[in-house]
Image (tube, rainbow, N blue to C red):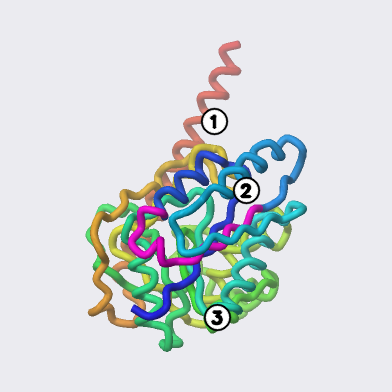
Amino acid sequence: MNNLSSIVLFVYNRPWHTRQTIEALQKNKFANESEIFIYSDGAKNESAQKSVDEVREYIKTVDGFKKVSIIEREKNWGLANNIIDGVTKIVNEYGKVIVLEDDLVTSPYFLEYMNKALDIYEKDNEVISVHGYIYPVKEELPESFFIKGADCWGWATWKRGWDLFEEDGKKLLMELKQRKLTKEFNFNNSFDYTKMLKYQISSKNNSWAVRWYASAFLKNKLTLYPGESLVKNIGFDGSGVHCGGDKAYEADLVDSSIDLEDTQVKEDLVAKKIIENFLRDNKIITYKKVINKFKQVWFGLLKK
């Protein structure tokens, strides 16, 4: 394996989640040979200050890595600006980067998979990134496979990949519409990424991730996925700014290495269809939950 990639971790005001994320990462093969940069965002308001301070107190005690560098923001940058700036600086300096947020718990094989894939596909311009999470689908997926676009729950890229990131959501949406690609962009309308992008443009969300996905998608670039997840999102407990309380996306962590040797560099349409079905089914379940909740509230009011 060539030089190991630097890791960038973005934290804010969740001490327990941050600790889980770091402790899992410390158990990874190659952790003690890897440099980690921890970006700590500033408090948005007074109520967040105590937990931000608690996170900062904890990250100053972190060890188990080759080197730990902490960047404390003096003010609140917000998740998108913090990630865009941090990833840009580190990838420009080191040429590649592994990216995590403070609610992502990793398998002990996460860093091995990421670094191996970064080595294998470093010079393959068709590949824009590597992703560690995969949806908890019922069907069996290949050990690893490619899908067009990019993703955001435990990922890695090279400078040549991140250079394609387009910050302007309006520009991305216009191109999607002009090329009549919104249906494909939405995984055959199984998940409304276009709506998410529109919300980003109108400041109803601050998603860097949908812009990263759109940037890669419009350039016809591929992202490598594992057949079993190396990442588990523990943020669906209502504690995060950008995560709700739905646990449908929680995946079990794989307990062995991922083989990358025979992965063909082209979009796996069978795997994509499986993911599409998962997203569509989950959308139906979520819709039914909303309707049932509405009925409960409405009938409760009628009884009063």
Pointer 1: what residue? 294
Q: Earlier in the sequence, mark 3 or mark 2?
A: 2
**Which of disc 3 and disc 1 is earlier in sequence?**
3
User: Is any part of residue 59 visible from this angle?
Assistant: yes
The kind of residue on which mark 1 rests is Phe
Measure the C-alpha gap from mark 1 to mark 3.
47 Å
Residue at 59% over, 61% down: 69
Q: Callout 2: 10 Å neighbours few (<14), some, many (20+)? A: many
In the displayed structure, 241 sits above or below 88; it is above
Residue 202 located within the stretch drawn in magenta? no
Question: How many neighbours does mark 3 have within 10 angstroms: few (below 14), some (14-19), or many (20 or more)?
Answer: some
Q: Which secondary structure lies at badge 1?
A: helix
Query: What secondary structure is marked by label 3?
Result: helix
Query: Residue 52 appears in which quarter of the rendering?
Result: top right
Could you tell me which residue is drawn at 38 percent across and 80 percent down? 2
> Given the image, on which type of amino acid does mark 3 rest?
Lys
> Where is residue 109, by image quadrant?
bottom left
**Location of residue 108 in the rendering, given as x and y in whole percent from the top left corner:** 33, 56
**3D distance between C-alphas at marks 3 and 2:** 25 Å
At mark 2, the secondary structure is loop
Label 3–label 2 contact, CB within 8 A: no
| Left or right relative to 301: residue 202 | right
Q: Which residue is mark 3?
A: 159
Q: Quadrant of the C terminus?
A: top right
Give the foreground label among 1 and 3.
Answer: 3
- Residue under label 2: 12
- Image quarter in which the N terminus is found: bottom left
Q: Compared with residue 17, is residue 67 higher up or lower down, i.e. above or below?
A: below
Q: Give yes or no for residue 36 being in the magenta stretch.
A: yes
Write down the region rendered in magenta.
26-40
Q: List x then y, in percent, for residue 93.
A: 60, 78
Mark 1, Cα crowd under 10 Å, few <14 / some 14-19 / many 20+, is few
